[in-house]
Image (cartoon, coloured by chain):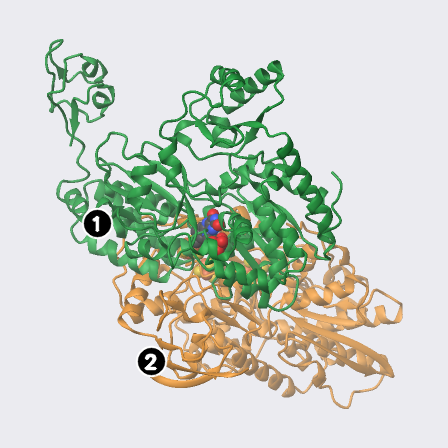
Amino acid sequence: MTKLATGVAFAEFADAVKAAEATAPKTRIFVGMSTCGVASGAGPVYDAIAAELAASGNPAIEVVRAGCVGLCYAEPTVEVQVPGRPVVTLGGVTPARGRELVKELAVAAEPAKPLSVGDAIFKKQLRIALRNCGRIDPEKIEDYIRNGGYVQLAKILDGMKPEEVIATVKASGLRGRGGAGFTTGLKWEYARAAAAAPKYIVCNADEGDPGAFMDRSVLEGDPHSVLEAMTVAGYAIGARYGYIYCRAEYPLAVKRLEVAIAQSRALGLLGENILGSGFAFDLEIKLGAGAFVCGEETALIHSIEGKRGEPTVKPPFPAESGLWGKSTTVNNVETLACIQPILEKGAAWFKAIGTPKCAGTKVFALAGDVKNVGLAEVPMGTTIREVLEEIGGGSRDGRPLKAVQTGGPSGGCIPAEKFDTPIEYDTLGALGSIMGSGGLIVMGQKTSMVKIAHYYMEFSCDESCGKCTPCRVGNRRLYEILERILAGKGKPEDLPKLEELGNVIKDTALCGLGQTSPNPVLSTLRWFRSEYEDCIKNGGVKPPVYTVNDKCIGCRACAKACPVQCIEGALKKKHVIDQSKCIHCGACETKCRFGAIDSE
Amino acid sequence: MPLVNIIIDGVKTQVSSDSTILDAARKVNINIPTLCHLELHNKETVNRVASCRICVVEVEGRRNLAPACSTKVQNGMVIRTHSPRVIKSRRVLMQLLLSNHPKDCLNCYASGNCDLQTLSNDMHTDSNRFEGAHSDFMVETSSESIVRDLNKCIRCRRCETACNDMQTVGVLSGVGRGFDMVVGPAFHAPLEKTQCVFCGQCVKVCPTGALMGKSHVEEVWNAINDPEKVVVVQTAPAVRAALGEEFGMEPGKCVTGRMVTGLRRLGFNHVFDTNFAADLTIVEEATEFIHRLKHGGRLPMLTSCCPAWVKFFEHQFQDLLDVPSTCKSPHEMFGAITKTYWAEKMKIDPAKIVVVSIMPCLSKKYEASRKELSSSGHQDVDYVLSTRELGRMLREAGVDFQSLPDGEFDNPLGFSSGGADIFAVSGGVCEAALRMAAEVISGKELDSVDFEEVRGTKGLRHAHVEIAGMEVNVAIACGLGHARRLLEEVRAGKSHYHLIEIMACPGGCICGGGQPFVDSREEIEVMKKRAQAIYAEDAGKEIRSSHKNPYIQELYKEFLGEAYGEKAHKLLHTGYTSREKL
Ligand SMILES: Cc1cc2nc3c(=O)[nH]c(=O)nc-3n(C[C@H](O)[C@H](O)[C@H](O)COP(=O)(O)O)c2cc1C
Ligand code: SF4
Ligand code: SF4
Ligand code: SF4
């Protein structure tokens, strides 16, 4: 690659990339090869397709190592794009199916057996941050450029004023996707206004919420979108250096970022005098120390400085005093991934998506008791129900859902009766939860909400940095009270105590971790108080009672599965469970193929 | 700074816009309680970690409570410092702190001097409301100077700020996470294994009994009660200016005479004065200085009577071990002379002599255990007690200190010049050395022995004085952070000083780590009063210059021979070891 010394040189390069595509359009087979895809066997699928293609010698078909489309439940996934046709998604692809696919595409315009649910899943979605994920080769800068990448950077460097860039981002209404929802344009404006250089821009790619992987998907599937946005941000606020603070547990993301950075430098899109504009910008990857709290921006800054990853009081905000005391702008990966489309399509376009208070889309990570686990990017204001039922496909056992926990470990649990709430920062807040980074953990009827609260408190206790009293000691005490309640040693006065303590922790903790960590307890107390009361009354969580219903055909599968042999009944006769011997393990329910075991 | 208008608890006031809510409240006499907050020495160092959260207040329009210690005022701010929401939160926070505290006040050395105890008394809240796990750390006693019982630690980080920001030693930091997080050396290393210099500044600022001086009171009582032993006590110059505070007396009252009587009542066989040895130190050190000046020796020369400072450069400036004077510190010289010269004179077997030093310092405890400080053939000093420990012993023995008659030190090791008294204050060693050097070099008596230019409370000072037409540049640092700056100049070859005096503690020994505890907000005032008391002692002495002390002259004549000579070297000088830099 040769350096593109001017904007004109870049335009020529971009045109050449596009022209190549126009003259010889290709059918592309995208194999989802993010960490998750590779873990579920995408590697051999890719190899099989590549080998088959090589053998067939068909130059019109290309196989691409792409990022993840977010359909975790259907991994390994393969998407097929035939020029001029909509993308078709295949799930559960084996190497054999991959070879078949190549043969099919040689003769037919579309592959057979596409994912049937695929359509419904995609219809509700609007992919802005994830636009390129799964649809380009993240290790090829040309792929990114072919989809419009770096064109905006070139345009800006060709004479747009920093203030104009900031004005556009501000007008788009984009709010930070890292959790707090602060208006990105305003953040950039403060940083621009901050006094002397050097200033820094930091991409927060720490993504410590268990179950969250939207940022990883972007980094693995479309790293250049982050690099371009950081460079734009650097230009807008007047920063010359940037850092990407990435979890050390994301080796593939780090590798793809490294490849992307090297390519950008080689093309002259990073470094001195970018495209001859006189603007210089470069960046560096810093590996996270692996603590959840290091995602908090002040802790993250201290970690980059080589200090203990521990939050400090705000103000001063990083925009005023961040890295080494200098103005620092911290932006989340997903936030940055929205910048290029905003610049390309305009602030008004973005602003019109979502709701008046929350423009644009949000990527959610669906997990727990839903059929379709995975990532979904939907416009703000989509209701919880739409996400859980239409995209997620509802509960696995078909029964109504009980609750959903939003916002990661320190989010609250929202009961099913509130599922028609449109998703926005404020609406979730009113329900005692948070948007957080976009985790959605779905809970079915059998979930004990007391156990859920206990589980999340354990997480917060482990992840507290220990600096401030309420979070260090208070969370531990919340956890211990829950433990006592679960062990059957709870007292009625524990409930107001939990509430008082939880509220004081929220009101007095130093950083966002402590200020939100009691949410799981407080929200479950608010919406599911009777479960706590039952727990106290009944001496702990009631174990489920399993009974056999009339659907039983007497196949003896359950009886064989029962480890204590407490299921009786002749072959082809309805079975009975001896409740006095049952150990409530649920093996029978799992084994039964006829839905004949009820649990209460 | 522009002024802003704010309302605190209904009181309208104007404060400078860089004030915190805490500053502003204090201005209108509202005392917001604090635990972790600490302003050291005229705010040169501020512990603003805002970790305890006790100072939270309600600010109109703000979602959560604000920590008053670290929230700046803004124009139009309406603040409530004791609304029901605030009081409830503070009580819960206190209950949480107490839920992980031994609450064993009756067995705690800090009882009566503990911010946690005082505040919980004020709140009178149910200390047992939250039950649960307790920290379970071993009490750490590895060093001779400091005992750490982290089960009492409230994670205020004051010690960390004192050690890292003020002293730049950098031993203490947050270790561990969550409930197990605590403050100490990295990897929970024992203090003895670190580059801690035992200055005790961390002990001084710890609001609880988590950090304490190690007590040697028991050993000293045993020695006193051992009929086989001859127990000799010496008192550092700084002790007399502060001991009264242990008995509720005003700071700045010198209690030399009462102290002497009190020590006799405790049963010490001979009550001597470290001051005597301070004079001896000056004779050796000034002679060394003159020697280096005249013979092109290593300059600047650094003083060496502060053991914390000595350990500091042994760890951090291993390349400069030839810069400090080789003189032992005064109480070590005293020990060496007592177990040789005095033992011979008194015909006492030195093995039977127990030398006890009463010191304003915790580092002296460690120093006394340094193996090489045994030129007398025995460990030169056996036990070191801090001023606080002496206060405790006197109280335990039922000595009514305030009404004690004045006593006189025993001789010959109890007589001293004014030059010895001022060892207690920052700048004093330098001044005493100049008093002698000036007269020796010029061969003339000084008109005035007061070198006002080297006095003061600032952490870093310099002056030049003329001695016989020669310009002598001196610098004085108290506090190791300041010392580091001077040392870095020396390392870079940019130091133009001839003599540098360094004390590890701000203000010098009068504010040492073993002195009576003082509220940090009053420390500067107390420091000044103690210093005044010392300068008054000096001014009241007939003999002001060390080399004119007749007993010192006699010591050289009868025993040591020449100053800075062979015997003096053997007994009174030492060498330095390079130590690991962690
Ligand atoms: C405990 C805690 C963990 C956080 N973790 C992350 C994280 O992993 N990624 C992230 O982008 N923001 C995280 N944040 C939010 C950041 O502090 C910060 O607000 C964000 O990175 C700003 O970027 P944005 O404005 O683009 O959202 C966390 C906050 C807290 C309190
Ligand atoms: S709230 Fe928790 S994580 Fe945040 S500073 Fe306090 S102890 Fe650390
Ligand atoms: S004694 Fe001094 S050097 Fe040692 S830990 Fe305390 S403050 Fe630091
Ligand atoms: S040891 Fe003392 S000063 Fe240090 S953090 Fe603990 S309580 Fe605070």
Quadrant of ligand 3 in image = bottom right
Residue occupying image coordinates x 31% and y 55%: A427
In percent of width and height, residue B216 lies at 49, 59
Judge left or right: residue B105 versus residue B353.
Answer: left
Observer-nearest residue: B392 or B63? B63
Asked whether mark 2 lies closer than 8 Å to ligand 2, one says no
The residue labelled by disc 1 is: A527
Q: Colour of chain B?
A: orange
Above or below: residue A475 compared with residue A99: below
Chain for numbered disc 2? B
Residue occupying image coordinates x 23% and y 56%: A497
Q: Quadrant of the N terminus of chain A?
A: top right
* Res B34 label: none
Judge left or right: residue A67 versus residue A243.
Answer: left
In percent of width and height, residue A129 lies at 49, 45
Observer-nearest residue: B499 or B406? B499
In percent of width and height, residue A217 lies at 49, 38
* Res B9 label: 2
Q: Quadrant of the C terminus of chain A?
A: top left
- For disc 1, the neighbor class at 10 Å (few under 14, some 14 to 19, many from 20) is some
Q: Residue furthest top?
A: A571
Residue B155 picture quarter: bottom left
Q: Amino acid at mark 1?
A: Trp
Q: Could you tell me if residue A491 is visible in this image?
A: yes
Colour-to-chain, green: A
Judge left or right: residue B252 versus residue B137.
Answer: right
Residue occupying image coordinates x 68% and y 58%: B376
Above or below: residue A373 compared with residue A423: above
